[in-house]
Image (tube, rainbow, N blue to C red):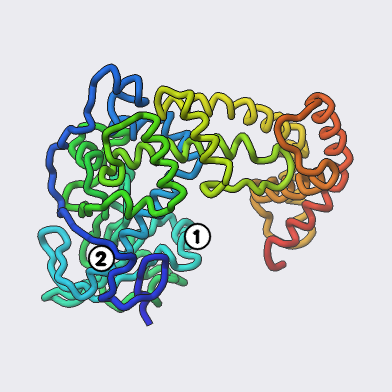
Amino acid sequence: MSWCIACHGGMVPPTRLPNGYDFRVSGTRNVESSGHHRSGTAHGRHRYPQSSLVRSLLDRRLMGLADRGGSSGFIGSAWGDYCRAWLTQQVGASFAVGTDMHGTVESVVDIDAIPGLAAFASSRALQNPDFVIALDTSNGSVLVAVDAKFSIETAKPRQVSAEILTALLESPGTPVRPVVPEHGVERDGFFLTPDYELTHLVMNGTTGILRTAVSADQVLLLEVEPEQLFVQAELRVLIDALAAVDETRVNWSSDLVAALYYGRCAFACLGCRIDETKPLLGRSDVRELDDPGFLPELKRRGQMARSAWQLVQRWDQDAEDVRALRIKVHQAADIGIANRDLRAIVERQAERQGRPAPSMNRVRRELAVRTNGELAKRFGTVFYPVPDLHHFLNELRRAVAEIQPEVPGQIAEIVAGTGPS
């Protein structure tokens, strides 16, 4: 049975419209931006990180802070869900790939969801597309690679190329071939990207952090309403609260630029909240968007801020004190073995056991988990602020010194779990 993709990875009949999406495709128009987000007023410069909302979406400071709260992962996943649902709706419909290929979509396979594919592709220097569609043309059925790319400037043509798809299908041990139809690959694929102002500016070369590597005929633009991406009620309330701080007249629920800007501000605040509240030592049980204390704290800070961006900046400054202390705690809790010494111990154990040596990153990661687990048993879960920081750090170092003699035995156990002898 071939994989029939649907929103959230479930199986649905090809004719069903998942999640009630109202799909519209814009094609590959190369048009000028409408410019309604291009405010160059002094008010705009003070309110946003850059001179306008749309340019603020490319502000590195906001992007970095938002990613602390998981912004990129959320947007990428939401866009992937939307594209799955849209492609599912195309099964049985007439479809054009560029200007040179027309046919009917037979099936769509979400190959990015295949277990183990990411590791398989990475080990062979391949980057897999998200989907493979089977297209019934006048010359026979063919396979075409498709990738959901919210930020088109990050798209690389090779990812949807015929070369990559052929390699994924023909490499020995591939997990792709068994789940896609037995068709050939005749042409490069395309990217699905949202049809909104920033995409057009980037495609036109007007703005962007990176130079766009794809051409217009490799991009299919899809219209999408912000509420179809920002579906979580908790996130919508946060966006409303931040937009209210700016007293903006832009309705984010019908304006993707505004939705993304205030969404990123929300994730930036979430990152600050997590940094402030997660333990300095011990297991973290910090809740995220549904943290009951998050929205009240955001609203409290909003009352003292002139703009959403100022709120983010001030919260970041407050959280930086906690981040700096967490670094000191992590340094004090470090097992204190130089890489060359650790590598020597690992290689001796691997040779003694007749097993492959694990990577240093894996060994350090597992040692840290064991060490932190032992320290948490001794000190409990430690939160900011610490009443006597100097005393606590000294006690932490003393405990680590007591644990160090156990490290060679722990490394032997890690090596023993690496693989067959």
- The image quadrant where one finds the N terminus is bottom left
Residue denoted by label 2: 144
Q: At 67% across and 31% down in the image, what residue appears?
A: 327
Give the mark nearest the N terminus, 2 or 1.
Answer: 1
Q: Secondary structure at mark 2?
A: strand
Q: Residues within 10 Å of mark 2 (few under 14, many from 20)?
A: many
Which of 177 and 43 lies nearest the eye of the viewer?
43
Q: Label 1 sits on what residue type?
A: Ala
Q: At 21% across and 72% down in the image, what residue appears?
A: 105
Where residue 266 sits: x, y (%)?
A: 45, 39
Q: Label 2 sits on what residue type?
A: Val
Looking at the image, residue 111 lies above or below residue 69:
below
Which of 287 and 200 lies nearest the eye of the viewer?
287
Horizontal placement of 408 versus 281: left or right? right
Residue denoted by label 1: 119
Q: Residues within 10 Å of mark 1 (few under 14, many from 20)?
A: few
